[in-house]
Image: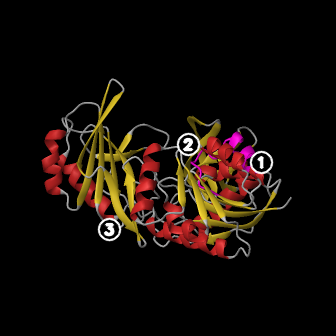
Amino acid sequence: MRVFIEKIVHGGFGLARTEKEGVIFVPYTLAGEVVEVELMDINKNNLKLAKPLSFNVKSDSRIEPECRYFKECGGCHFQHMDYKSQKLAKFSILDDCLKRIGKIDYDKYEWVDAMDKFGYRNNFQFKVDENGHLGFYKMFSNDIVPVDKCLLANENVNKVIKILNNLLSNDNRPDEIDIRVSPQNEIYLIFKFEKNKMKQQMNSILKNIEHVAGIKVVNINNDREESSFYYSDAMQFDISEYKMVVSYDSFFQINYKVLNKIAGLINDLINSIKELPSIMIELYGGVGTFSILNFYKKFDFVIMIEESHKSCDNALTNLESNDIGNVSVWNVDVETGLARIMRQDLDSVFIFMDPPRTGLTQPVIKSILRQKPEWILSLSCEPSTFARDLSFLVKEYEIVKMYVIDMFPQTSHMETLTLLKRSC
């Protein structure tokens, strides 16, 4: 079947319209290409997927992928595009989500380049195959593609991959291995396995991997999880001039250089506001990253709301170690925290939110609108849920500025940073 790729949409797929099959989605294509495809016997979120077989018309922006695992491993979506086309594809994805999901016609967003197109990622979760080799799932499959390196990974991650591939076997392999590398290139590992086969390997691992700062070993027996630690029970590193502690299971951004760019953009946006509210409410505050990098200096008082107990413990430690005293950490879910704030009858507040990929719940959106903050600053990693949530907020707020931030080159993922001002 021959199809014309109309545009790139969510997930990095090329969208094509057919008379017989309706709309179909084709990976590894570019807008404007004419492709011979074959329907795949896969139903992903009720989408009809097709496999590209050959190209009748190729885009001038098509390039040879640098990674030999591309198209086999499911990690990257855009290595067949030059970087300018990756930018246009992400604009297309966001534009489609805003118009189709959010019913929002807005195209004045500004692009923020990634500083590194490869080698930027500091945090990975690997599957382990039956031979003890680290790898990733194939696209649309639970089959593991073993790898000896990943081009998106920090060079120290790739060194660890090579060492572990030589150390592990079917007899001692865990089910998953997480590798994290700090900005100071210290290495933190998490081994997850169902049977306790790993402890005899610890001395060998510690001997062979340089700069190991901490290891967490997780045993899962009959749904009961037990953890043990070597060296440190949390990651410890510096971001800018600040000292940070992050538990192994706590969220932290995977691209340190772009994180610093985001912090700079947040400062610029806050500085552009002439009459700033005195109180910042940070929703989904994590380990206190933006309260520390941005908010404590700009506001008289900051209320940080975070549901995860471990993340809140990290945030309190980070605030204390950096001698920051005007941030209050609330270990509650966001809906409960906003209800508590409403009872305090605060006059003027600024809300910052960095929700998970699932976005905001309806009760949270309603609580934000009842709070009536003068300003809202949203950081989102998922354009579909961002567009959905924004559709409710724009009824009472106008978009002042929107950035599309390329934190994840070679993939269809992006961050959006959006400043909203109350309009009614």
The amino acid marked with disc number 2 is Val
Residue tagged 1: 370
The location of residue 189, given as percent across then percent down, is: 29, 50
Q: Is residue 82 visible?
A: no
Which residue is more in the foreground, 160 or 34? 160
Nearest-to-viewer mark from 1 and 3? 1
Tell me: 97 left or right of 260: right
Q: Residue beneath label 3, please?
A: 184
Say which element carries label 1.
helix
Q: Earlier in the sequence, mark 3 or mark 2?
A: 3
Q: Indicate which label's residue lies in the foreground, 3 or 2.
A: 2
- Earlier residue among tags 1 and 2: 2
Q: Position of residue 12 (x, y in %)?
A: 59, 53
The furthest residue to the right:
424
Residue 339 in picture, x, y percent from top left: 68, 43
* 1 or 3: tag closer to the N-terminus: 3
Identify the amino acid type marked 3.
Gln
Report the front residue among 105 and 330: 330
Taking the magenta stretch, the answer to whether it contains residue 366 is yes
SS at badge 3: loop
C-alpha span from label 1 to label 3 = 43 Å
Work out how far the residue at label 3 is from the one at label 2, CA to CA, in angstroms: 32 Å
What is the number of the mark on residue 332? Answer: 2
| Distance CA(mark 1)–CA(mark 2) | 19 Å
| Cβ atoms at labels 1 and 2 below 8 Å apart | no
- 10 over 31 or under it: above or below: above
Q: Which residues are magenta?
A: 352-370
Locate the C terminus and report the quarter of the image it occupies.
bottom right
Answer yes or no: is residue 400 visible: yes
Residue type beneath disc 1: Arg
Residue at left 42%, top 49%?
Answer: 313
279 or 126, which lies in front? Answer: 279
